[in-house]
Image (cartoon, rainbow, N blue to C red):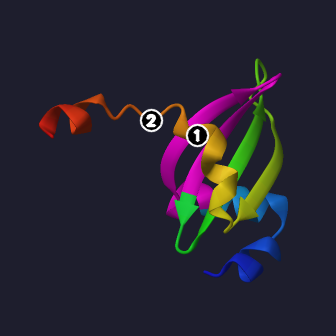
């Protein structure tokens, strides 16, 4: 599925697609939301959930790798460095 085709889906269909086809990559907390990052084919998708209720309020999809920066601080590379 391409990003353009994905963005034409309803929000519910996007959520279902991410749940069934997406690969979970990371999580971050942003104010009152938890944001889950998934990889799908050649694009990324974020699911914005309200903290507490868990209600999904937004799905954002993109190909720009600059938008991955908020997740980089969560990646632990100590094991990789120890192998060098």
Q: Can residue 42 be seen in this view?
A: yes
* Residue annotated with mark 1: 71
Q: What element carries label 2?
A: loop
Up the image or down, 51 lies above or below 9; here it is: above
* Residue annotated with mark 2: 75
What range is drawn magenta here? 18-38
Residue at (64%, 32%) from the top-left corner? 28
Across and down, in percent, residue 67 comes to 69, 53
Quadrant position of residue 55: top right
Across and down, in percent, residue 63 comes to 67, 69
Q: Quadrant of the C terminus?
A: top left
Quadrant position of residue 81: top left
Kindly give the residue lying farthest to the front in the view shown.
84
Up the image or down, 46 lies above or below 2; here it is: above
Quadrant position of residue 19: bottom right
Picture disc at residue 53:
none
Residue at (72%, 74%) from the top-left corner? 6
Q: Is residue 45 visible?
A: no
Q: Residues within 10 Å of mark 1 (few under 14, many from 20)?
A: some
Total number of numbered discs in the rendering:
2
Up the image or down, 29 lies above or below 56; here it is: above
- Is 23 covered by the magenta stretch? yes
Across and down, in percent, residue 10 comes to 84, 66
Kindly give the residue lying farthest to the top in the view shown.
52
Q: What element carries label 1?
A: helix
């Amino acid at each position: 599925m391409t990003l353009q085709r994905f963005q034409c889906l309803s929000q519910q269909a996007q959520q279902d697609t991410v749940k069934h086809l997406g690969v979970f990559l990371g999580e971050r907390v942003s104010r009152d939301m938890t944001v889950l990052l998934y990889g799908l084919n050649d694009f990324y998708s974020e699911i914005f959930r309200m903290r507490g209720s868990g209600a999904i309020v937004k799905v954002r999809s993109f190909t720009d790798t600059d938008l991955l920066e908020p997740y980089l601080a969560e990646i632990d590379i100590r094991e990789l460095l120890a192998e060098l």
